[in-house]
Amino acid sequence: MQITSVLQAGTSYPFKWPDGSTEIYQNWIEYEARASDGKHKVKIGFCRRAVYGQERVRVTVWIDEYPQTEFLGADDFAASGEVLSEIRVRGDVGEVMCRYPDDAIPERYTIFNGVGLPTRVNAKGVRNTWAVVANVSDHRTMIALAALRRMERNSKA
């Protein structure tokens, strides 16, 4: 998926999750992007949410208003600016995490920088999974991951 233009940017974007909760993204940017199946609107929203024992930066990427992937701030986010998104693979029922270090990173994810989530997030309850790491300003990488997840979900149907 290739970014073709910036459509708009703003503050205070409310998103209602399927469980009924609403999350407010303090900042967001919306792009027009092109893929093999045509034009799409891609929105990236930024907020803070308590996860793994502390409040962390959270980034959500929507394609055509559907959330495709989420990232969370690494423990050293203030210094590195890096966010992580757990690698998920198709399981017998839904998606399952790609276990770190036991599983190999699926080939389709090797275009991304992969790390073990517990090497960047040290907290109780952190899953032993592989994660894609990106700088919070690297929208191309975040959109590429969202596009891959969208493609995987659509191929399941």
Image (cartoon, grey):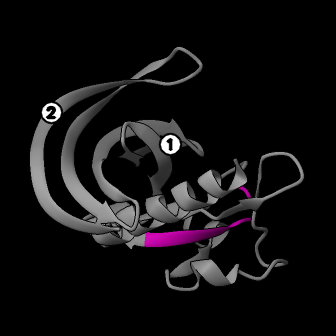
Number of marks in picture: 2
Give percent across and percent down for residue 77.
Answer: 37, 62
Q: Residue at x 25, y 60 (%)?
A: 33
Between 129 and 143, the residue placed more toward the observer is: 143
Between 99 and 66, the residue placed more toward the observer is: 66
Q: Which mark is residue 11?
A: 2
Give percent across and percent down for residue 10.
Answer: 12, 37
In the picture shown, does residue 100 fall above or below 28?
below
The answer to whether residue 74 shows anywhere in this view is no
**Counting residues from the N terminus, which is met first, the one under dot 2 or under dot 1?**
2
Residues at marks 2 and 1 touching, judged by CB atoms closer than 8 Å: no
Q: Which mark is residue 54?
A: 1
Give percent across and percent down for residue 108.
Answer: 61, 79
Q: Is residue 19 left or right of residue 101?
A: left
The magenta-colored residue range is 126-133
The answer to whether residue 127 shows anywhere in this view is yes
Q: Secondary structure at mark 1?
A: strand
Q: Residue furthest right?
A: 92
Residue 132 on the magenta segment: yes
Q: Quadrant of residue 106?
A: bottom right
Q: Residue at x 46, y 41 (%)?
A: 67
Q: Residue at x 77, y 59 (%)?
A: 90
Q: Amino acid at mark 1?
A: Gln
- Neighbour class for label 2 at 10 Å: few (<14), some, many (≥20)? few
* Alpha-carbon span between mark 2 and mark 1: 23 Å
